[in-house]
């Protein structure tokens, strides 16, 4: 074989080899595989969260109605008291004397009434005979009316004196937990109905108990619109359910219901005050404790996806979806709370979208990339 023919054959073989290799290199790496599934469409019970504090249903400042020296203290600081339990005794002796004096005045007034009545009875037949003038009879009748009025005043004084005597024993006006005593035995306390009375102690009721919170203006308007369309009853008219979680708890285990919404919004904070009520038989809740509350916000149709399928893109939350052409697209979404272990998507997705569930860790899976899909499933956790 000639050298020129050999060289020509080698060239032809090299060209053929290059024609086979170049198309394979042009294909690039294989498309990444991802698992996709359609979001779960479900009717979702929404709950709005608020911070608030517990407040007693009844709270009383115990103050004396009469003045005097404290003679006895009948309770132990911080104990549970019932309605009518004696708390303090103010020295009753001055009031006993006043009551006895008032009763004596009643006896004197009754004697005067009896005397005036006998004079009127004796004068009545003498008027017809002319032995007693009409003017004298009228005077005697007037004296009888005056003495009867004086008797009524004396009887009222007795009631007042006996009431003051009764008030020397200060009793619990409500049942609940009492605070410590603010005065000790031997102290002079000031009673009455003015603002200068002496504070003896305070009592707060424990069961049931209120939970007070503030809702924003936007939430108030949303609730009002839901009520107007019949999707959710107003908490002014219905006892919408609430769930409470204390600061050391992770589950919403305490149940209650709404029982009040204020009649106006606070113009400074733009919030409206709401109130829930719940049982406190175990006395776990105490007035002043802060907690978190969930308020029933109605039922809406929503889409559910795993929380791991959500990606942060600067200030946005996005979800990768795969089109019919196998190309990845970024869908900005508005998220809601976790529901049955899945994230609620309020907007940005369609029920038919194929959401990327697995494979997001691959840097090749990005918007515009072509991927190979594998069917998966979104499963809601058992509540």
Image (cartoon, helix red, strand yellow):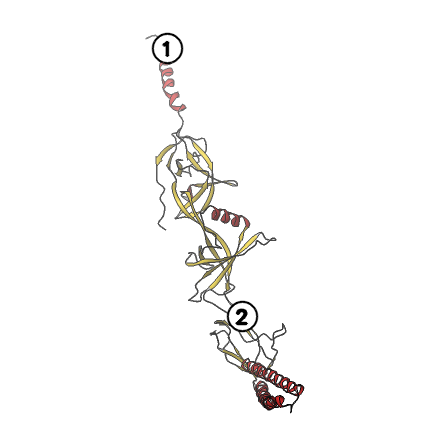
Q: In this view, does 70 lie to the left or right of 259?
A: right
- The residue at which mark 1 appears reads as 8
Provide the secondary structure element on which disc 2 rests. strand
Determine the residue positioned at 66% across, 88% down.
133
The residue carrying pointer 1 sits among few (fewer than 14), some (14 to 19) or many (20 or more) residues within 10 Å by Cα, namely few
Q: Is residue 358 visible?
A: no
Which image quadrant: the N terminus? top left
Q: Is residue 167 left or right of residue 22?
A: right
Indicate the quadrant where residue 273 lies: bottom right
Of 140 and 327, nearer the camera is 140
Q: Hey, which residue is sitting farthest front in the picture?
A: 129
Determine the residue positioned at 39% across, 45% down.
43
Of 380 and 70, nearer the camera is 70
Determine the residue positioned at 36% across, 19% down.
20
Q: 283 above or below 47?
A: below
Question: Where does residue 121 sit, x and y in percent of width and height?
Answer: 58, 89
Question: Where does residue 143 sit, x and y in percent of width and height?
Answer: 64, 86
């Amino acid at each position: 074989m000639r050298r020129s023919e050999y060289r020509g054959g080698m060239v032809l073989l090299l060209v053929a080899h290059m024609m086979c290799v170049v198309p394979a290199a042009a294909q690039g790496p294989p498309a990444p595989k991802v698992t996709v599934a359609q979001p779960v469409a479900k009717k979702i019970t929404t709950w709005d969260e608020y911070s608030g504090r517990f407040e007693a249903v009844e709270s009383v400042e115990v103050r004396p109605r009469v003045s005097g020296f404290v003679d006895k203290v009948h309770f132990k600081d911080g104990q549970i008291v019932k309605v009518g339990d004696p708390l303090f005794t103010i020295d009753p002796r001055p009031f006993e004397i006043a009551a006895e004096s008032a009763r004596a005045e009643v006896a004197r007034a009754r004697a005067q009434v009896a005397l005036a009545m006998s004079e009127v009875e004796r004068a009545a037949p003498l008027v017809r005979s002319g032995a007693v003038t009409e003017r004298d009879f009228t005077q005697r009748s007037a004296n009888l009316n005056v003495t009867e009025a004086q008797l009524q005043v004396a009887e009222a004084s007795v009631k007042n004196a006996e009431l003051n005597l009764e008030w020397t024993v200060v009793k619990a006006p409500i049942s609940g937990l009492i605070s410590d005593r603010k005065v000790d035995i031997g102290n002079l306390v000031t009673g009455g109905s003015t603002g200068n009375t002496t504070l003896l102690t305070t009592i707060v009721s424990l069961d049931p108990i209120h939970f007070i919170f503030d809702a924003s203006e936007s939430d108030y308007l949303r609730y009002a619109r839901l009520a107007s369309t019949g999707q959710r009853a107003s908490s002014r008219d219905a006892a919408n359910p609430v769930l409470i979680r204390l600061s050391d708890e992770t589950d919403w285990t305490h149940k209650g219901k709404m029982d009040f919404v204020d009649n106006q919004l606070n113009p400074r904070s733009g919030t409206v005050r709401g109130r829930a009520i719940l049982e406190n038989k175990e006395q776990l809740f105490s007035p002043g404790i802060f907690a978190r509350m969930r308020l029933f916000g109605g039922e809406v149709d929503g889409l559910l996806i795993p929380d791991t399928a959500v990606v942060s893109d600067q200030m946005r939350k996005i979800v990768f979806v795969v089109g019919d052409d196998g190309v990845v697209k970024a869908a900005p979404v508005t998220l809601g709370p976790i529901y049955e272990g899945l994230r609620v998507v309020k907007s940005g997705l369609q029920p038919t979208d194929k959401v990327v569930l697995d494979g997001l860790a691959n840097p090749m899976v990005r918007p515009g990339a072509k991927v190979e899909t594998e069917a998966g499933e979104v499963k809601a956790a058992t509540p």
